[in-house]
Amino acid sequence: MDKLIKIHSLDNVMIVTADIQAGEHLHIRRTEYYFDKPVGIGHKVAAQFIESGGKIIKYGVPIGSATEDIQMGGHVHLHNMKSDYIPTYTYEKQYPGDANPSLTNQSINQVL
Amino acid sequence: MSHMQWQGYLRKDGRKGIRNYITVVYLVECAHHVAREITSRFKEHPVQLIGFAGCYPNAYADRVMNSLCTHPNVGAVLLISLGCESFDRKKLEENIRQSGRPVNSIVIQEAGGTRKAINDGVRWVDWCSGIIGNTMMVPMTVNDLVVGTVCGGSDATSGITANPAVGLAFNKLVANKGIAIFEETGEMIGLEEVMSSRAVNPQLAIELKKSVEKAARYYSAMGHGSFAPGNADGGLTTIEEKSMGAYCKSGDCQISGLIKPGDRPVQPGLYLMDVVPDGEPKFGFPNINDTVEIVEMISSGCHIILFTTGRGSVVGSAISPVIKICANPQTYRRMEEDMDINAGGILTGETTLRDTGEKIFEGILAVASGIPTCSEGLGHQEFMLSYKTFTPLGPGCLPV
């Protein structure tokens, strides 16, 4: 069985379907992947080289961007990708002349 | 493909049902016991219990109840009223009669109390069981079907097995001119652009986006976060990714419309159901449990619900069968009797995403042709209807 599956044909990441141990080699469709660190089930692995700033594609759509170059087979997670999402509704309340725009709807990473 | 056609129950409005239930309906909690007693005398018959607990009027509950009582899977209706509740029983009874279904009302205060009301009700259901078998049967195909999907008891496997597999089944359903409905706008935060780009026209794109923004506002007012540290442990990195895990149940075909509970799509295609109330939060959480969501989907005409679960939900539903698709292979092994389809096999290498999508589609056809789901076999018929407030749909939401 494949320990790495692609959910959508357009994806540039694969999903780990069973825990990968440190030092493990995997052969997926004639490509060899080597893992020097463990990668847990449900995590993402780059299916190709992803340039810094490039979109991470899963389910056929962008789910964020790479914050550094990611080699094929590299673990893709908090350390090398980020969300591109800024809620549009947080801006709706900031009318011209609004003296004290509410912060309550802003996401945590905008406030910190 | 002969298995793509089966016999369904023809209703006066032209819709076709895959089940033929006598539905006993209590119109206030005070009438619940009498309705339950009547239903319980018919355990081996297709007789089901639903109801609305509230004593105060609510336009949404009224609308949903009217839709449910005239649902194609319902063949006859018995209304149980205490007598002083505010539910508009006369209008509901008239609508059911207009729909060509046998209907009767029992008012407990007029019948002379609990025992007499139960006896009257049992007698009517008994009589009705005799005539309901005469309902005309006609050929039915995928393009007569409305199928909804929800997830409940999700875990880290839901978004990589069962949910994308349902998406594949939805693609095939829509390609075969069926109607597919998905929901959970509260779990689409971060996907406003992705989703609106699938809209059939620009007007709908705006409405789709607004529905997610409304959900985001509503949930933040309820004090709900979207992304928890546990999500990152499970391999999820961004809110977009987490949301996609639920949203991928919708597959990747064009979105034809946006509906609210009780609105009924008529054109084939994929529809988003907006279940988040309009206006300021008034009655608490949009949906307090999975059953409320299932009932709303059924009120919009769903014949079948595809329910994905990782942790292992056991629920079924009154009126429409629920096909449970288990995302997690360990859960499947533990709760096999409750699960119709094992999508967890994608993780163990027993099956693939593509084959599971096919299996779900085949499962829809099998259940539509009369084969009971696990939850039907186990006697599940959960039901719940609560208070909500909705404004009518915006322009361009529902093609006719």
Image: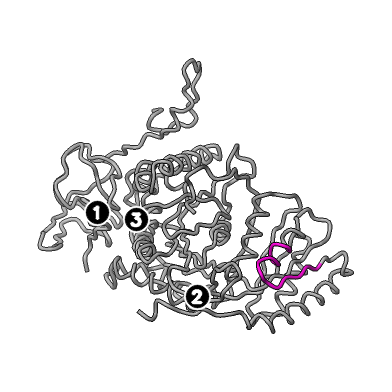
Question: Which is closer to the viewer, label 1 or label 2?
Answer: 2
Residues B174 and B157: in front is: B174
Q: Which mark is residue A39?
A: 1
Q: Is residue A96 above or below residue A92?
A: above
Number of labels in the image equals 3
Q: Are marks 1 and 2 on the same chain?
A: no
Drawn side of residue B234 relative to residue B102, left or right: left
Question: Which residue position holds label 3?
Answer: B253
Q: Are marks 3 and 1 on the same chain?
A: no
Drawn side of residue B232 relative to residue B398, left or right: left
**Within-10-Å neighbours for mark 2: few <14, some 14–19, many 20+:** many
Snapshot quadrant of residue B13? bottom right
Residue pictured at 73% horizontal, 81% vertical = B126
Q: Which mark is residue B374?
A: 2
Residue pictured at 39% horizontal, 80% vertical = B3
Residue B111, image x, y percentages:
87, 69
Choose the circle earlier in sequence order: 3 or 2: 3
Magenta region, residue range: B93-106
Mark 1 and mark 2 residues within 8 Å of each other at the beta carbon: no
